[in-house]
Image (spheres, rainbow, N blue to C red):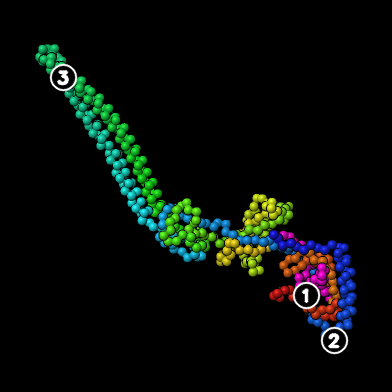
């Protein structure tokens, strides 16, 4: 949730505050004039001249880092872990060998698949030579030759029998031989057709078996390759969850390990519905500028981030919308799960008076500053502050441009007493 800015005090409250401070001032001034050694030098204080300026208004949101693309390392085959080759918590590169399974069963499967493929290729080569078809065609050619001879014998004997130069028995034998030769030719033609069909079927079947065995060999080779488990992505790897000798399967509930990519690192935070609507009215879905990540120790992460994703619904339980930002993390300093704060500019105020937070004193429920007049005497002044930007507070009421206020040395100042002012340098470290 964003850090709430302090609301400005209302005018009636300010009037009451002025009256109370005036009473306090009078009493303190009288007391201050009576106190202090005679002739003591005025205390040394640093003062700044307040001038209007433009300031950016920032809000802080509770945030947590996370890894968007964290990957579980898993096995694609079933086997026993023979060795693992990484140091838990180390950086691994994509493709780096992490585990090696017992490869002997996979190597045997490759050899078996390769042998089956060679056998089927030999069968296909034999089928393509069409030996059976050639034999059937040769038998058909022989039968056709015998048919031609029987036809010639029949034609030669018919005129001889008619001329009573040959016996009827010889003609009957020739006719019978002709009929037998014709049937033999028909049978051999059918055999050739059947053999041709069988040969085509055998070629197609054997060709399919060759392709199947090629696929089986490729599967066996892939399984052998999968027996060496490599990093699917680069990042920081966790501890191994399966020891050497442990059985791994593709469907195991527990992964072998996990890899977390750390650059960039992702950060999620929630904004209120009203804040989201404020951006939407300006035509934005989220803050458009750079984001600052404040770490758990209060330090700023050196890289700046940007909002990359805005979720599609407001959580009805909390009334907040989740935003997701990415930060370059080249040194891998940040890890998933760390808590911090996202600081983002939500507005810009022009021509406002801002003063250092350390110049403001809290008296009960009132805020005051010491002003230094032209006579170098300090006067207590009630103010009303608005938003805070870094170590500065915006003053909504109580100060005018050109007035001097005490920034350092407040403990030595008494209302109405003289001071020795020195210019305040806000460029000095710590200011």
Dot 2 or dot 1, earlier in sequence: 2
Residue 220 % position (x, y): 38, 50
Residue 60 visible in the displayed image: yes
- Local secondary structure at mark 2: loop
Q: Please report contact status of discs 2 and 1: CB closer than 8 Å, yes or no.
A: no
Mark linked to residue 310 = none
Q: Please report contact status of discs 1 and 3: CB closer than 8 Å, yes or no.
A: no
Mark linked to residue 37 = 2
Residue 208 % position (x, y): 36, 40
Mark linked to residue 407 = 1
Dot 1 or dot 3, earlier in sequence: 3
Residue matched to label 3: 174
Mark-to-mark CA distance, 2 and 1: 25 Å
**In the image, is 380 to the left or to the right of 267?**
right
Residue 400 visible in the displayed image: no
Q: Is residue 313 magenta?
A: no
Residue 397 % position (x, y): 83, 66
Residue stretch in magenta: 344-373
């Amino acid at each position: 949730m964003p850090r709430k800015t302090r609301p400005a005090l209302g005018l009636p409250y300010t009037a009451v505050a002025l009256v109370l401070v005036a009473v306090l001032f009078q009493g303190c001034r009288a007391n201050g004039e009576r106190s202090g050694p005679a002739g003591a030098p005025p205390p040394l204080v640093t003062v700044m001249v307040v001038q209007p300026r433009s300031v950016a208004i920032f809000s802080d949101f509770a945030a947590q880092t996370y890894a968007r693309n964290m990957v579980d390392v898993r096995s694609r085959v079933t086997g026993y872990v023979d060795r693992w080759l990484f140091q838990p918590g180390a950086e691994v590169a994509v493709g780096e060998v992490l585990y090696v399974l017992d490869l002997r069963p996979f190597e045997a499967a490759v050899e078996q698949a390769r042998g089956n493929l060679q056998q089927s290729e030999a069968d296909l080569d034999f089928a393509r030579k069409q030996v059976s078809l050639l034999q059937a065609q040769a038998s058909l050619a022989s039968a056709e030759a015998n048919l031609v001879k029987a036809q010639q014998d029949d034609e030669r004997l018919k005129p001889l029998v008619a001329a009573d130069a040959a016996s009827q028995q010889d003609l009957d034998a020739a006719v019978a031989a002709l009929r037998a030769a014709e049937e033999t030719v028909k049978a051999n033609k059918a055999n050739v057709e059947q053999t041709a069909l069988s040969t085509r079927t055998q070629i197609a079947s054997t060709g399919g078996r060759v392709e199947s065995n090629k696929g089986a060999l490729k599967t066996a080779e892939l399984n052998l390759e999968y027996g060496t488990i490599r990093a699917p992505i680069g990042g920081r790897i966790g501890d191994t969850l399966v020891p050497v000798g442990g059985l791994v399967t593709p469907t195991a509930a527990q992964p072998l390990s996990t890899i977390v990519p750390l650059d960039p690192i992702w950060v999620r935070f929630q904004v209120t519905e009203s804040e989201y609507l404020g951006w939407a009215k300006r035509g934005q879905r989220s803050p458009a500028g750079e984001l600052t990540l404040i770490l758990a120790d209060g330090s700023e992460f050196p890289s700046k981030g940007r909002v990359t994703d805005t979720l599609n619904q407001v959580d009805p339980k909390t009334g907040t919308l989740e935003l997701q930002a990415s930060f370059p993390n080249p040194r891998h300093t940040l890890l998933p799960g760390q808590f911090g704060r996202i600081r983002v500019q939500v507005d810009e105020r022009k021509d406002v008076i801002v003063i250092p937070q350390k110049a403001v004193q809290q008296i009960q429920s009132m805020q005051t500053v010491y002003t230094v007049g032209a006579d170098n005497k300090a006067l207590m002044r009630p103010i009303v502050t608005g938003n805070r930007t870094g170590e500065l507070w915006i003053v909504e009421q109580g100060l005018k441009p050109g007035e001097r206020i005490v920034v350092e040395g407040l403990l030595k100042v008494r209302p109405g007493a003289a001071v020795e002012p020195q210019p305040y340098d806000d460029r000095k470290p710590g200011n």
